[in-house]
Amino acid sequence: MEIIDIALVCINYFFEMWEKHNGFISAIVGIAALIIARQAINTTTKDNRQQVLVSKYEEIYELVSSTVVEYELLQNLYAKLQQCHSKQNELESLVFDFFDEYRDELTRIKSVIDTDELFNKLIRLNVLSNAYLDEPLLFEVNAYSSLFQEILITTVQLQFITEETDFKEGFPTNEELYKFTQNIAHQLIKKISLGTKTIDTVKFENYLQSDFKKTIGLK
């Protein structure tokens, strides 16, 4: 029986006892039933709130995981853009050649990545982070989203990195950003209560290269 059903049974029992006996003992029993009902409702409300939080943590986890896999393509595209900007003082024909190459690469990447959808995911990530996370994880997720939005806008719109931008130093390597998001993922997993321990990547790689490959007949 669901907790809310138990609460309703307790409330109904209170009124039945009150109408039937209208006595002191019945009233005490009825009041006890009401207290139990209230506790049951409070427990249900708390459980529902926890379920909502878990679902939001899961969505944040999914958004981080599904966006970071696209970063390497954009990071490589950014490197090409920097090459284009560095050639601007050279022969005009050479500059045009570089930008033509860049636009071709941008077109290819847009055929692989839906940049509009990616941007919407990053905005959604900001919204969820601000609504459901606390510091320091709140700052970490927002910083990740801001950096990703910046490289996306920079590469798609062919913008310069200037002193006014948040990331005037440029953008990290794919490996460094991936390590950062792994830390975010570990914290989210704990919040989701999937476990207090996270995978040891070194141990996993050893297992993959030895026991697993032996088991499936590759060694």
Image (cartoon, rainbow, N blue to C red):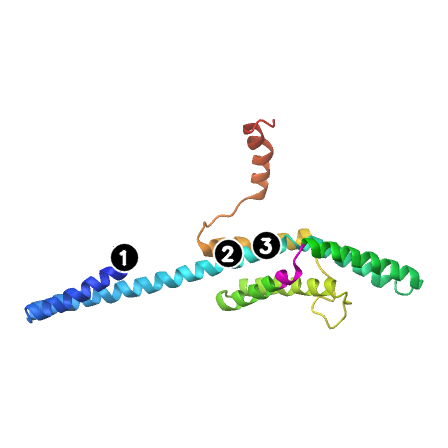
Q: Is residue 42 left or right of residue 62?
A: left
**Residue 3 visible in the current orientation:** yes
Q: Residue at x 58, y 43 (%)?
A: 201
Instruction: Check disc 2 and report the residue beneath it.
Output: 188
> How much space separates mark 1 and mark 2, taking CA atoms?
29 Å
Q: Amino acid at mark 3?
A: Ser
Residue 66 is tagged as 3
Q: Quadrant for residue 97, please give it.
A: bottom right
Assign the N terminus to one quadrant of the image: bottom left
Q: Position of residue 63 (x, y in %)?
A: 56, 58
Residue numbers of the magenta segment? 113-119
Give neighbour class at mark 2: few <14, some 14-19, many 20+ (Cα, 10 Å).
some
For badge 2, the amino acid type reads Leu
Q: Judge whether 159 appears above or below 1 on screen.
A: below
**Circle 1 — which element?**
loop
Q: Looking at this rendering, what residue extends furthest in the right direction?
A: 91
